[in-house]
Image (spheres, rainbow, N blue to C red):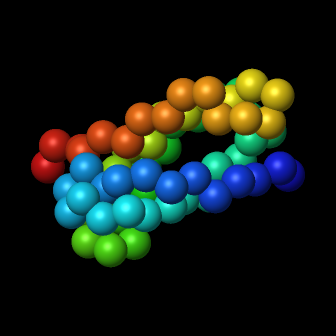
């Protein structure tokens, strides 16, 4: 599996955090908790030739 660490800003606490993305999947949407504030983040990303070409991290309405 080809993975990369991707850094972004949490939409809740505004801290710079990172998730490990699987670049063998062309596009994916999943939910993962922020490592700082523990709120759930919906992550959507797309890859092409082992590079992240689109990334979005959104709050989940609770």
Q: Which residue lies furthest to the left in this view?
A: 62
Q: Is residue 26 left or right of residue 59?
A: right
Counting from the top left corner in percent of width and height, residue 9 is at: 35, 53
Q: Which residue is situated farthest in the bottom direction here?
A: 36
Residue at image position (14%, 49%) is 62
Residue 56 picture location, percent across and down: 42, 35
Residue 12: give x, y in percent of width and height. Answer: 20, 56
**Relative to residue 23, is residue 11 depicted above or below?**
below
Q: How many marks?
A: 0
Residue 26: quadrant of the picture:
top right
**Residue 7 visible in the displayed image:** yes
Residue at x 32% of width, y 74% of height = 36
Residue 25, position in %: x, y?
73, 35
Rendered position, 35 above or below 6: below
Q: Is residue 33 visible?
A: no
Q: Is residue 47 above or below residue 23?
A: above
Classify residue 14 as left or right of residue 8: left
Q: Residue at x 71, y 47 (%)?
A: 22
Tell me the residue at 51%/55% (across/down).
7
């Amino acid at each position: 599996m080809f993975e990369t660490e991707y850094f972004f800003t949490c939409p809740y606490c505004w801290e710079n955090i990172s998730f490990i993305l699987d670049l063998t999947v062309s596009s994916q949407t999943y939910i993962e908790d922020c490592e700082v504030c523990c709120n759930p983040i919906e992550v959507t990303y797309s890859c092409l030739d082992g590079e992240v070409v689109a990334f979005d991290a959104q709050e989940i309405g609770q």
